[in-house]
Image: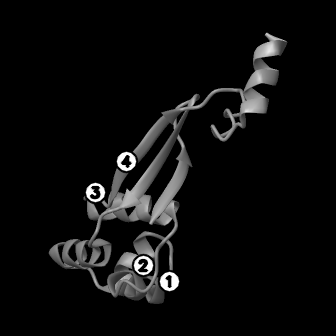
Amino acid sequence: MAKPARGRKDFEIEYEYVDDLGQVVRREREKLGLSQAELAALVKTKETIIKKIEQNEFNPPLDLVKRLEKVLKTSLLTVAVEEKLTGKTPPPPSTYTLEDMLKKQNKQ
């Protein structure tokens, strides 16, 4: 359920939905006295999408979850990973053979 999103300039932030996303959406919607159709209109989506989210049949995209958070005034996401990005490619996995290590050492 993790969704990546660009964060600050040099960070990659990955979000996860709360475990009971559908239940939270339904509970908060009902607290506000909104119907599924009214909530759908407020977040600019279809009523069927809200129904599917509440029944845990659909994992909504990050932008929709953020709109739901704003309307429902509740947190539906948690930060799972925040890692600094470098301009370089990540190092290859450490599955070098002895020959590879010797070649690398000789180059230095």
Residue 8 left/right relative to 29: right
User: For the residue carrying disc 3, how many other residues have a C-alpha within 10 Å: few (<14), some (14-19), or many (20+)?
Assistant: some
Write the residue at 84% across / 14% down.
107
What is the quadrant of residue 33 in the picture?
bottom left
CA–CA distance in space, label 1 to label 4: 27 Å
Q: Nearer the viewer, mark 1 or mark 4?
A: 4
- The reply to whether the C-beta atoms of the residues labelled 1 and 2 are less than 8 Å apart is yes
Amino acid under disc 2: Ala
Considering only order in the chain, which callout, 4 or 1, is on the residue closer to the N terminus? 1
CA–CA distance in space, label 4 to label 2: 25 Å
Considering only order in the chain, which callout, 2 or 3, is on the residue closer to the N terminus? 2
Q: Is residue 99 above or below residue 51?
A: above
Residue 94 left/right relative to 71: right
Write the residue at 48% across / 72% down.
60
Picture colour scheme: one colour
Residue 75: mark in rendering: 3
Q: Which residue is mark 4?
A: 79
Residue 46: mark in rendering: 1
> Where in the figure is residue 26, as x and y percent of width and height?
25, 79
Q: Which residue is mark 2?
A: 40
Q: Secondary structure at mark 1?
A: loop
Residue 79 left/right relative to 34: right
Q: Secondary structure at mark 4?
A: strand
Write the residue at 75% across / 16% down.
105
- The reply to whether the C-beta atoms of the residues labelled 1 and 4 are less than 8 Å apart is no
Amino acid under disc 4: Val
Considering only order in the chain, which callout, 3 or 1, is on the residue closer to the N terminus? 1
- The reply to whether the C-beta atoms of the residues labelled 3 and 4 are less than 8 Å apart is no
Q: Is residue 2 above or below residue 24?
A: above
CA–CA distance in space, label 1 to label 2: 5 Å
Amino acid under disc 3: Ser
